[in-house]
Each structure stands twice: as C-alpha cells, then as structure tokens.
Image (cartoon, rainbow, N blue to C red):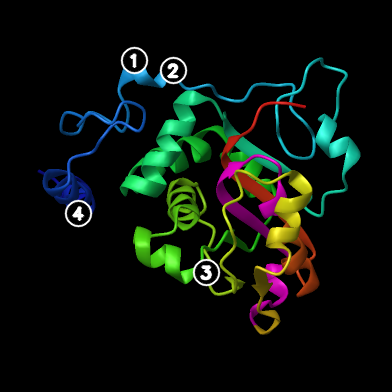
C-alpha cells in the first residue's frame, strides 16, 4: 500500500465511522441504506422532481413556455434578491422529505441534497462570486427543539461539495422574533409576519460580503427570502442570491 492510498483511507475514516455508528437513510423512503451504497435508493432517485428549464429568471420556479422569462408572482412583485436556484419542485415526495428533516431530525438528508445541488449547479454557484453562504436563521426556541438549523445543514453540505468551498456564516443574519406559522397566511400576511423577524449585523459585513448566497430548504411565496434579503441589503450587502432545495409550483 503506497502513501497516497494510506492518506485516502485516513481521509475517509471519519465518514466510514460515522456511517457505521449512524447508518444512512434514504431521503425519500427513509429506509436504512446498505453500508457505503450511496445517499439515496436508486429507485427513489427517479421519484425526485428536479427543476427543469424553462425557469423564472428571478426565483428559479418552473414556467410554461420558452418565451416566459418570469413567473406570475415575480412579474407582480419586486424582489430584493438577484435571483435564485432551486433543486427540486415542491411536490408530495419532497414535502415529506423536508418534513422529516425538520420534525423528525433527519439532518443527514441535507448531505444528499447539498451534494446534489453542488453537483448540478456548482459552476453557476461559484460564478455568483459570493463571499459567504448565509443560512436563513431559525429562532432559538425552534433551534432548541430541533437541535439544528436545516438551512445551515444545507449550506454546510453545499460548501463541502463545491470544487472551491464557500465559507458558511451564521453570525451575520439573526432571527430576533419568533413568528407564527406561515402555512395558513396569505403572501402579504407572510411578509408582514416576517418583516421585523430578521436583522443583519452591520458590524460583521466587510468588503468580502458584498455578495452573499442565502440558503433555505423551501421557497414558496418568497416571503422569507424577501425579508432576509431586505435585512442584508439594509446592513450593507450589495447583492443577495438564493439556494433552495425545493420551490413551489404555480404561477
């Protein structure tokens, strides 16, 4: 065994040990995967609805027709972010997977989604020339309940799987208000609900953070992305981009 082989084994040792102690589960069916067999069942991979062109030039949502540049929502409402990229359409399969991440502690799913996003969009992400990946923060009470922030887990995975890692910064954007659940609110109510929830620390925004990438699990109405983008821009960031695992269908 040569030195390079030994070095390779040493580099893989932590991941191997982790998988032995905590076997991976498929992010779609939740079954335990065979050891070192990958991060998703082959048959489940085909069930995922990856976003396909044409997509909205602003939010990244699929649109109908090659001549359509923006979705209905983005033509009606000004967005503060530059543009967004989403990996999956938000359907029954991805909805169940995201729910298991947030409410059943399946943090490891984000390793698959982050790797898939880096593999598919890595070059485009790097062309954003961002100084940091900034996860959408959760309130400390929810963080205590879940034990982790799913948006931060996504950012960590994306960064780790990019050809050139981008720093993950959790000290810039803060959540200072626990808001009511968003699912039963209208888009306008959602934005009002979140308008005072986020704050960016201006003292931590240096020249390297002129451009940043905001990460989150789901983009539906865009209210969270808009509230976070406004907070970051108000604190001195010049351009905000989005990375989302899932994005809603619709107009």
Asked if residue 111 shows in the view, the reply is no
Q: Nearer the viewer, mark 2 or mark 4?
A: 2
Between discs 4 and 3, the one toward the N terminus: 4
Circles 2 and 1, Cβ within 8 Å, touching? The answer is: yes
Q: Nearer the viewer, mark 4 or mark 1?
A: 1
Q: Nearer the viewer, residue 176 or 213?
A: 176
SS at badge 4: helix
Circles 3 and 2, Cβ within 8 Å, touching? The answer is: no
Q: Quadrant of the C terminus?
A: top right
Between discs 1 and 3, the one toward the N terminus: 1
Q: Is residue 85 above or below residue 212?
A: above
Between discs 3 and 2, the one toward the N terminus: 2
Image quarter of residue 166: bottom right
Q: Is residue 93 above or below residue 209?
A: above
SS at badge 2: loop
Q: CA distance from mark 4 to mark 3?
A: 24 Å
Q: Residue furthest left?
A: 1
x, y percentage for residue 55?
74, 27
Q: Which residue is mark 4?
A: 14
Asked if residue 39 shows in the view, the reply is yes
Q: How many marks?
A: 4
Between discs 2 and 4, the one toward the N terminus: 4
**How many other residues sit within 10 Å of disc 1, few (<14), some (14-19) or many (≥20)?**
few
Q: Which residue is mark 2?
A: 47
Q: Quadrant of the N terminus?
A: top left
Q: CA distance from mark 3 to mark 2?
A: 33 Å
SS at badge 3: loop
Q: Which residue is mark 3?
A: 170
The residue range painted magenta reads 204-225
């Amino acid at each position: 065994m040569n030195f390079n082989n030994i070095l390779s084994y040493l580099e893989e040792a932590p991941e191997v040990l982790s998988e032995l102690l905590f076997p991976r589960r498929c992010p779609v069916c939740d079954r335990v995967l065979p050891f070192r067999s990958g991060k998703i069942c082959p048959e489940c991979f085909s069930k995922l609805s990856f976003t396909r062109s044409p997509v909205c030039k602003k939010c990244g949502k699929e649109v109908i027709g090659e001549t359509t540049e923006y979705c209905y929502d983005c033509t009606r409402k000004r967005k503060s972010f530059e543009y967004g990229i989403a990996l999956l359409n938000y359907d029954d399969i991805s909805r169940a997977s995201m729910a298991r991440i947030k409410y059943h502690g399946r943090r490891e799913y984000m390793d698959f989604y982050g790797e898939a996003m880096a593999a598919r969009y890595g070059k485009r992400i790097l062309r954003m020339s961002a100084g940091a990946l900034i996860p959408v923060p959760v309130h400390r009470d929810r963080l205590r309940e879940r034990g982790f922030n799913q948006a931060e887990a996504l950012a960590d995975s994306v960064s780790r799987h990019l050809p050139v890692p981008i720093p993950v910064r959790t000290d810039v954007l803060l959540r200072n208000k626990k808001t009511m659940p968003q699912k039963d609110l209208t888009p306008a109510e959602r934005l009002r609900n979140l308008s005072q929830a986020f704050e960016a620390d201006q003292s931590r925004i240096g020249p390297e953070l002129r451009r940043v990438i905001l990460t989150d699990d789901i983009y539906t109405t865009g209210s969270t992305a808009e509230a976070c983008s406004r907070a970051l821009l108000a604190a001195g960031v010049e351009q905000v981009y989005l990375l989302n695992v899932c994005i809603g269908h619709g107009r």
